[in-house]
Image (tube, rainbow, N blue to C red):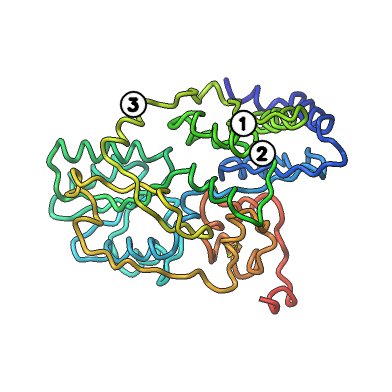
Amino acid sequence: MKFVDEFRAPELIAKAGEEIRRLAVPKRHYRIMEVCGGHTHAIYRFGLKDLLPANVELIHGPGCPVCVLPMGRIDDGLALGAQAGFIFAAFGDMMRVPGTHGSPLEYKARGMDVRIVYSPADALKLARTNPEKHVMFFAIGFETTAPSTALTLMRAKAEGLHNFSVFCNHVTIIPAIRAILDSPDMRLDGFVGPGHVSTVIGCRPYEWIAEDEGKPVVVSGFEPLDILQSIVMLLRQLRKGEAKVENQYKRVVPWEGNRAALRAMAEVFELRPYFEWRGLGFISQSALKIRASYAEWDSEQRFSVPGVRVTDPKAAQCGEVLKGVLKPAQCKLFGCECTPEQPVGALMVSSEGSCAAYYNYDHRKPVTIASAASV
Ligand code: SF4
């Protein structure tokens, strides 16, 4: 298959691994963050970590939109969706994410009208076909999915469809990277930049990371060779003492981004003054809210939102894992109290969550009486 087979060719992958080992200076320890959860899954799914020398360490970043959502936002969305006459619509990734009193699927089992949709446009279709109900779309995602929410809201407004609204949880990637770089317990040498987000925002928004922070960034695709080649490009820069933004994923990511998508986002959204991220706390101007001109289709402006703030279960270390301070298997609950079947945190549920990647492809930590007792 074009653009897949050549990026999974074993001989090319072996060569890239050799090049990484050649470029990595033995006395130096490299800490490279892959920002995007999609990269984390590819790294573990294809066993890429095993091709790296011990001194090239990959740190998993916060680029999983389901994982960074604090539990209070899930509770707020479920409280709205549980009202009589509502349909709660969300992506499948959200369905097993725990809120304080259960996940959307558990609410569904208790009788709430919960529907899985594959796009915001599907949620709009639900509103058209259920005029007696109010359809609330629980929107999540970085700049990757925000344009489709924006276009759906524009469509709802154009059609005058009033039984539809969006509970907006869209976040933006750059402030999260800034928060990580500002974190005193984090030392990083460079970034494998997020491929999907960059199809929309392009490569320019990362330039400050290279220019002001002196860290190289390589925007990367998701196939094994993409990721290894990106690490090669980062190591070449580090060897030369350079720090610049490079685009490994040129076949998909335009340097200037997708102007039509950015225009749609600018029409519908503005930046929130601040937003709470799981593990990272409140970050200013890090999320999108719906503009007043679309208030009628904004669940938060139209209905009363409880505004719940909840801390994660005490033993859960989702925050440290999201910041890259701990590896998933270092969380005390990993593989015993927290599994994909019985998740405690969103990182174990989402298809982009690093705990799910570890559990499914890497570290299946056996449950022992001692490990269970130490929780
Ligand atoms: S194992 Fe579970 S509780 Fe621990 S960090 Fe991962 S998702 Fe959170």
Q: Which mark is residue 171?
A: none
Disc nearer the start of the sequence (2/1) = 2
Amino acid on which the number 2 mark rests in the picture: Gly
Specify few, some or many for label 2: CA neighbours under 10 Å numbering under 14, 14-19, or 20 or more: many
Q: Are marks 2 and 1 in contact (CB under 8 Å)?
A: yes
Q: Residue furthest bottom?
A: 373
Q: Residue furthest right?
A: 27
The kind of secondary structure element at disc 2 is: strand
The kind of secondary structure element at disc 1 is: strand
Specify few, some or many for label 3: CA neighbours under 10 Å numbering under 14, 14-19, or 20 or more: few
Amino acid on which the number 1 mark rests in the picture: Val
Residue under the point 42% across and 47% down: 171
Residue under the point 59% across and 29% down: 245
Indicate which label's residue lies in the foreground, 3 or 2: 2
Q: Please name the residue that numbered disc 2 is placed on.
A: 190
Please name whichever residue, 373 or 143, is drawn nearer the observer in this view of the structure. 143
Screen quadrant of the C terminus: bottom right
Q: Please name the residue that numbered disc 1 is placed on.
A: 218
| Left or right position of 59 against 289 | right
Residue 84: x, y in percent? 19, 65
For ligand 1, tell me if the residue under mark 1 lies within 8 Å.
no
For ligand 1, tell me if the residue under mark 2 lies within 8 Å.
no
| Left or right position of 201 against 149 | right
Please name whichever residue, 135 or 189, is drawn nearer the observer in this view of the structure. 189
Above or below — where is 231 with respect to 312?
Answer: above
Give the CA separation, mark 2 to mark 1. Answer: 8 Å
Q: Looking at the image, in which quadrant does ligand 1 appear?
A: bottom right
Residue 165: x, y in percent? 23, 50
Disc nearer the start of the sequence (1/3) = 1
Disc nearer the start of the sequence (3/2) = 2
Q: Quadrant of residue 317?
A: bottom right
Q: Please name the residue that numbered disc 3 is placed on.
A: 260
